[in-house]
Image (cartoon, rainbow, N blue to C red):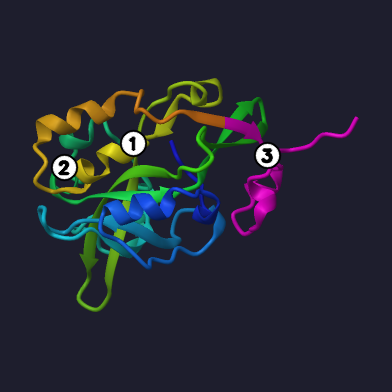
Amino acid sequence: MCGRFSQNLGRHHRAIHLFRRLGLDGFAIPVRFNIAPSVTVPVLHQSAPAPAPVELREMRWGFVPEYARDMSEGMRHINARIETVQDKPTFRDAFLTRRCLVPASGFYEWHRNGKTRTPYYFTNADPDQPLALAGIYTDWYDGTTSLSTFAILTTEAAAPVQLIHHRMPVCVAPDDWAEWLDPATPAARLARYSRPASGVELVHWEVDPYVNNARNEGERCSEPLVRFK
């Protein structure tokens, strides 16, 4: 699964170039090191087929289905399995026509050993290049409140994530961003994204348990843990 990630794109020198390839310029993404479900973050989406523009839009993490009675439903749907997303009525339409990308500098996963949970940080092996986590989004309205929400898609973990957890977010390679975002992309083309190998190589390191508390922020969350003997 994916339950926490960071957005510190200033450290990735290719981020501006990659966003400009999608027609985005002058964008601003706040620096955050410990993003948890229910937080609102900038997300890339395309509301109509190309040549419609790609937009950067604020969305809340936690997919709230259109039929939901209240927004708390979103906490049940922070992730969706890409292998079965087309089979689930909750997610099917969004997967076919409302896909998004969540810009990230990295994501966190926890290794369980009995009652101990050790946090690890995963990021692109290319330090100049950000990650783009595959997602789906929807617009929810209850008559008074309008809310845009998203879920991050997960797949079977590949190395090195599989050493820590059996699931991982789907990471979309830069050359595939446009295809993923375009709502006109045929469903048959989307099947390939369910494979663990995504063309994005990851590296990881253990981080301070400080990140375990979602209220904690700052570079300490993602810095390699230094143990003193």
Residues at discs 3 and 2 in contact (Cβ within 8 Å): no
Residue interval drawn in magenta: 204-229
Of 208 and 198, which appears nearest the observer? 198
The C terminus appears in which quarter of the rendering? top right
Q: Which mark is on residue 92?
A: 2
Instruction: Say whether marks 2 and 1 touch (CB < 8 Å).
Output: no
Q: Residue at x 49, y 54 (%)?
A: 9
Distance, label 3 to label 2, CA atoms, is 36 Å
* For marks 2 and 1 on the same chain, the one whose residue lies earlier in the sequence: 2
Residue at image mark 1: 173
Q: Amino acid at mark 3?
A: Val
**SS class, disc 1:** loop
The residues tagged by marks 2 and 1 sit, at their Cα atoms, a distance apart of 23 Å
Closest to the observer: 119 or 23? 23
Structural crowding at the residue carrying mark 3, measured as other residues with C-alpha within 10 Å and reported as few (<14), some (14–19) or many (≥20): many
Residue 214 forms part of the magenta stretch? yes
Tell me the chief SS of the magenta region. loop
The residue singled out by tag 3 in the image is 207
Observer-side mark, 3 or 2, equals: 3
